[in-house]
Amino acid sequence: MPAENDPLKLTLKNNLDEVKCIWSGIETKLKDCCMTRRELFQINLAVDELFTNIVSYAFEDQKEHDICVNIRIENNHIVVELEDDGIPFNPLEFTPHDLSTPLSERAEGGLGIHFCKRLTAEFCYERQNNKNRVTFKKRIKKPGLLKKLFSCGRNHGN
Amino acid sequence: MEISENKDGNIHIFELSGRLDSRTSPEFDEKIFLAMENGSNNFIIDFQSLEYISSAGLRVLNKAYKKLKHTDGKIMMCNMVDYIKEVFEIAGFDTFLPIVSDRQTALKSLS
């Protein structure tokens, strides 16, 4: 029997097509629990934005790279971790455009990291062994069913 | 992602369904800019069947809004679920791109 808190692990390639594996992975695992659509959407969005950012900017070569996404539960939080071997990038140091500037004068883009920070808690970054690791938490209201769900299946992406 | 288009008078309506993300937003970008090239100047984006949007989708709308500024064009969005609306608010888009409850209200406002 898998342990109750075994994480969901996704190993994705640095290709934007893999975005669909993020939402299918997250939604397949979490759709039957009592998370709201809003909570699911926000977790999906935060992972998607970080992943898209890594694929778009982290690699200076044309080689294939692995981007690891780990999702686990800790008490009443979902904890998400993304790891890549791209160039160092600390999202915490990223400053979004001034959002009070009229849209017509604002540069496009740069919103993804802003969304992640606004929609999640305890957003952390570390650089170790030539890898970037971003971790964030998302509080969920009814964690009981989540535990049950994680104990039912854990093999996606392994 | 499915994108359907129709016109009501001189108002160009896009109905988006599925997921508008970094994979699918180039198609929406292409279609809305083609519509502008073909003379459409007022747009309604109907979010009724849209399940998901990421910053890539907002980027297309930002680009379109900027272009339409030069021609006094407008974009109105409608039928948005609360958690997608929240993303537009966090991005500070809602002040510039009006979000209304339904398509009739959007049509009335643009007519």
Image (tube, rainbow, N blue to C red):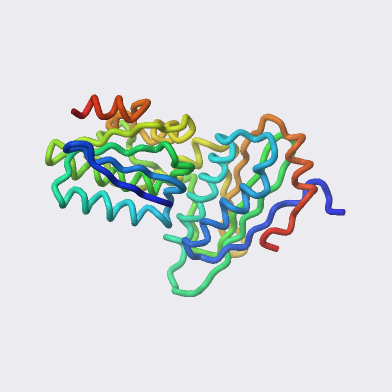
- Residue B63: x %, y % from top left: 26, 46
- Residue A87: x %, y % from top left: 48, 63
B37 on left or right of B101: left
Quadrant where the N terminus of chain A sits is bottom right
Q: Nearer the viewer, residue A33 or A58?
A: A33
Q: Quadrant of residue B6?
A: top left
Residue that sits furthest to the right in the current view:
A1
Q: Residue at x 68, y 34 (%)?
A: A34
Q: Quadrant of residue A75?
A: top right
Q: Nearer the viewer, residue B1 or A69?
A: B1
Q: Residue at x 49, y 35 (%)?
A: A118
A135 on left or right of A60: right
- Residue B103: x %, y % from top left: 32, 30
Q: Residue at x 12, y 40 (%)?
A: B71
Q: Nearer the viewer, residue A49 or B49?
A: B49
Quadrant where the C terminus of chain A sits is bottom right
- Residue A107: x %, y % from top left: 28, 45
